[in-house]
Image (cartoon, rainbow, N blue to C red):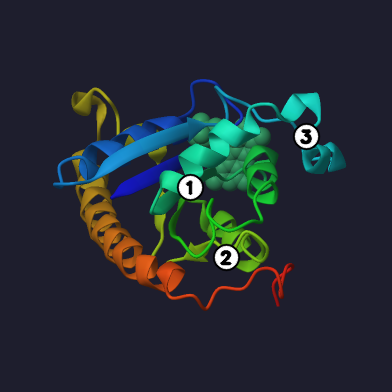
């Protein structure tokens, strides 16, 4: 089982990446689970334009990226809340994929990050508008890493235990659920019912 972690901040050394490292560490304590991370702050992607469809030169990295995504059974999408929104880098990433494989009919755990008590707008935005053509399946549970400076730190002495412990409990529950959905949705993808040719742009 392989879980892809997409870090949606534009910042090179982001709190979102830190949360991603924490979630990866939790996942790799489970047997037979590996992770792959794409940090859009460290590896920014070009903004979508129509040359994506004619293999324009700026898209030369896409086949290798597609291969990585195809290999994943599920995803964690991490988005800091910026002005109540998902950062453009993550929306752009979600715009790039619309074929079979990649993200399609694979489960995803939406994870918001806030320096304070925010994060809910990000979850709502991802659930409402980020899956139609790429066919990503948001699982019912989500995570919000609030007061993020006090949790998930690489140096655990910098954590506030009163915040870290409940977040870790929720995270581990949500990760177990993500893995169960990843297992189950493999059956949907293998079932033969998916027909993106007939319904190219979703419903
Ligand atoms: C441009 C900008 C806008 C922000 N807007 C919000 C917001 O609307 N709600 C919120 O809870 N935090 C907001 N924050 C604080 C971020 O949640 C916080 O800085 C977070 O750690 C940024 O994540 P990152 O380090 O992964 O980029 C904002 C931060 C920035 C840089």
Q: Secondary structure at mark 1?
A: helix
Residue at 66 percent of width and 66 percent of height:
132
Residue at 68 percent of width and 46 percent of height:
96
Mark 2 C-beta to ligand 1 under 8 Å: no
14 or 27, which lies in front?
A: 27
For residue 150, side relative to residue 7 (left or right): left
Q: Which residue is mark 3?
A: 55
Label 1 vs 3, first from the N-terminus:
3
Residue at 80 percent of width and 43 percent of height:
53
Which label sits on residue 70?
A: 1
For residue 167, side relative to residue 77 (left or right): left
Q: Which residue is mark 2?
A: 127
Q: Secondary structure at mark 3?
A: loop
* Residue 8 image point, x, y percent: 55, 39
Q: CA distance from mark 2 to mark 3?
A: 30 Å
**Residue 149, picture quadrant:** top left
Seen in the picture, residue 49 relative to 122 is either above or below; the reply is above
Label 2 vs 3, first from the N-terminus:
3
* Residue 27 image point, x, y percent: 24, 44
* Residue 196 image point, x, y percent: 65, 68
Of circles 2 and 3, the one toward us is 3
Q: In which of the image's four quarters is ligand 1 placed?
A: top right
Answer yes or no: is residue 7 visible: no
Label 1 vs 2, first from the N-terminus:
1
Image quarter hosting the C terminus: bottom right
For residue 115, side relative to residue 152 (left or right): right
Give the number of callouts.
Answer: 3
107 or 68, which lies in front?
A: 68
Q: CA distance from mark 1 to mark 3?
A: 19 Å
Report crowding for label 1: few under 14, some 14 to 19, many 20 or more residues within 10 A (C-alpha): some
């Amino acid at each position: 089982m392989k879980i892809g972690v997409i870090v949606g901040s534009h910042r090179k050394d982001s709190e979102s990446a830190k949360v991603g490292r924490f979630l990866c560490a939790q996942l790799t304590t489970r047997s037979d689970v590996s992770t792959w991370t794409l940090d859009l702050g460290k590896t920014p992607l070009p903004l979508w334009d129509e040359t994506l469809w004619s293999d324009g030169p700026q898209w030369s990295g896409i086949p290798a990226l597609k291969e990585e995504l195809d290999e994943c059974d599920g995803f964690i999408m991490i988005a800091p809340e910026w002005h109540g929104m998902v950062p453009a880098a993550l929306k752009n990433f979600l715009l790039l994929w619309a074929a079979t494989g990649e993200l399609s009919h694979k489960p995803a755990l939406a994870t918001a990050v806030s320096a304070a008590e925010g994060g809910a707008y990000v979850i709502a935005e991802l659930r409402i508008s980020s899956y139609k053509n790429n066919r990503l399946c948001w699982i019912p549970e989500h995570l919000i890493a609030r007061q993020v400076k006090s949790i998930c730190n690489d140096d655990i002495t910098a954590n506030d235990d009163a915040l870290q412990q409940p977040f870790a409990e929720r995270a581990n529950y949500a990760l177990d659920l993500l893995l169960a959905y990843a297992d189950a949705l493999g059956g949907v993808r293998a079932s033969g019912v998916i027909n993106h040719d007939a319904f190219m742009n979703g419903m």
